[in-house]
Amino acid sequence: MSPHQLPAFRRRASGATNVEFACGNFAIARRTAYFVDSRKSKNIFGRSFLLALLLLLSASRSYPQTAAELPVNSTHAAKHTNTSDTWPQQAVRGTHAMVATDEALGSQAGVTILKQGGNAVDAAVAVAFALAVVEPAAGNIGGGGFMLVRLADGKTNFFDYREVAPAKATRDMYIQDGKLITDASTLGYRSIAVPGTVAGLELALKTHGTMKLAQVMAPAIRLAKNGFPITEKLVREFDEEKPGLEKYSVSKRIFLTNSRNQNHAYKVGDMFRQPELAATLQRIAKNGAADFYRGKTARMLVADMQSNGGIITSDDLANYRPKIREVLRAHYQIEGHRWDILTSPPPSSGGVAIIEALNILRQTPLKGWEDLQSVRMVVETMRRIFADRAAYLADPDYSDVPVAGLISDCYGKELFATIDPQHASSSKEIKAGTPHVCGISAGQSTSSNMVVSLGERPHTTHFSVVDAAGNAVASTYTLNDSYGSHVTCSAGFLLNDEMDDFTTQPGVPNALFGLIQSDANVIAPNHRPLSSMTPTILLRDGKLSFVTGSPGGPSIISATLLSVINWMRLGMDAQAAINAPRFHHQWLPDEVVLEKEFSPVFEQALNADGYATKRKGHIGLVNAIGIDAQTGDRLGAADPRDHGSAMGY
Ligand code: DON
């Protein structure tokens, strides 16, 4: 009997049960076992569908659709207090296109643009602007992020619109008397890095889109101007974030006081209108990113900075440049199929970490997350990739990140050899390795002494889009903490606290994630702070197969990795790959973080093997899209852990 009871999953219909991983002349064969007991799982798909339909009916009044009216299939988890036995068990199926985001209104914005004839990039830009209105915790124009694009003709691009440190930023700007100043890098004007989102979205649209900014921004502008009904999730967030938001007058006015209701706090169902944000979005729609970086919005932002002790100047804004980077790639042979992984290069640490992990794990069979040995192998892998992350990853424009060595097969094999399958390793003993490419031998191992812990509350957002032609977008963007710095610009948008992703004091954990990171990631003007955001796309036999990514700080890497393993190696259905329980280990602190679905018996078995454990309600929010290899249908698998929404047609 398995050591714990998890919802069981069946393998995708396609493919045999024999899984073969091949790497050069190395190959192993393995029988995997994933079964579904559909009687066990209450399916709320019907209820979610009705709710979403109601939402769509009301939304359609504010979103005139010009294209043929194809029915939209959708689902979203309606309640915060949802538990895994009420989660949808099936992905949303669309024969043409699919959008999966954290919010129904965000997904609807993407579908609207697709139905107007836009491609996946047009829709993704529409989603990003819409989430900036309806998901203030993470959706943004005052933050930054990454967008991975894979076009149906095989072209790929990675848009890096990560924030940068202002010119006046200094290595020790958050240190006083040898200590980090409490909250300095996470709250208020001095925690804000130069935002990249607007420039990045404009660049992606110009490079691959077919529509004008004004057209793709129309849903966002309507949502900001006309408003939308406040959800239970927003009421809860405003309440949770009150201590930070009430410190800043614009934040307090916009998020904490409903001027139409005698300035009381918002209640569920109240209309949430954001006229300043609507005006800003309208200016951007008309004048492009130039408004944000050199126009009226820039002037408003700089004036706010000057009167509140911030350091971002008009030059910082005018000098901001998004970058197009080469996509990071690896490939695997599984069950006679070639899998290509397309993922995020530095300044993301995630793509390197995920390929490094897959290279380690291809040396070993994996059965699933009811199997103690499989969980242990992945935990030991996570321990090692996070040790390397802490030592080697930083902004590639300013440091020499050994990417080729970290993602080489030979290095993965060497790290695998350091895992004792019978006993837990200790993070005190596991140091960063010596990455090297095949054929060149490794030198002395670099030792490091980093401490890492996991933040509990922060938020970021990932969304995935696939259009009818097969163009795909995976995008993750963020304000860093939930509601970022908690400062709202007088132009109506929240500003990030991304400065905390730098090594704020070498040798000391940063405030939000308790990460000690390398000296290469110290604060310096114009540098990009290291990120864990990892938008990722999988191809199977050269065809689009899976689009994924997650929020979660360091656990972004674990959540995204697990979704990839679930789809590519364990052959789970799309929704099962998202619902499956998650776990996380980030080297230091030396503990396995388990979602609540793991049983006490399973946890005790890990403890008996020498693993310290800790519980977390949920890890990551993965909004993914799978492609049915037989029919080509798009399978929208939004994360039910917190209101994910997939819509397709
Ligand atoms: O870029 C990063 O790695 C972090 N700023 C992401 C923060 C995050 O995911 C918070 N959310 N859940």
Image (cartoon, rainbow, N blue to C red):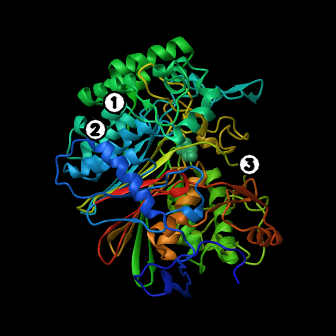
Whether residue 326 is visible here, answered yes or no, is no
Q: Which residue shows up at 58% across the image and 38% down it?
A: 236
Tag 1 and tag 2, C-beta contact below 8 Å: yes
What amino acid is found at the position of numbered circle 1 in the picture? Asn
Q: Which residue shows up at 57% across the image and 29% down it?
A: 485
Q: Position of residue 386 (x, y in %)?
A: 64, 57
User: On screen, 253 above or below 523?
Assistant: above
Q: Position of residue 187 (x, y in %)?
A: 61, 28
Quarter of the image with the N terminus is: bottom right
Which residue is denoted by mark 1 in the rendering? 226
Q: Which residue shows up at 66% across the image and 77% down it?
A: 371
The alpha-carbon separation of the residues under discs 1 and 2 comes to: 8 Å
Quarter of the image with the C terminus is: bottom left
Compare marks 1 and 2 and give the one earlier in the sequence: 2
Compare marks 1 and 3 and give the one earlier in the sequence: 1
Instruction: Note whether ligand 1 is within 8 Å of mark 2.
Output: no
Compare marks 3 and 2 and give the one earlier in the sequence: 2
Which residue is denoted by mark 2 in the rendering? 62
Give SS at disc 1: helix
The alpha-carbon separation of the residues under discs 3 and 2 comes to: 50 Å
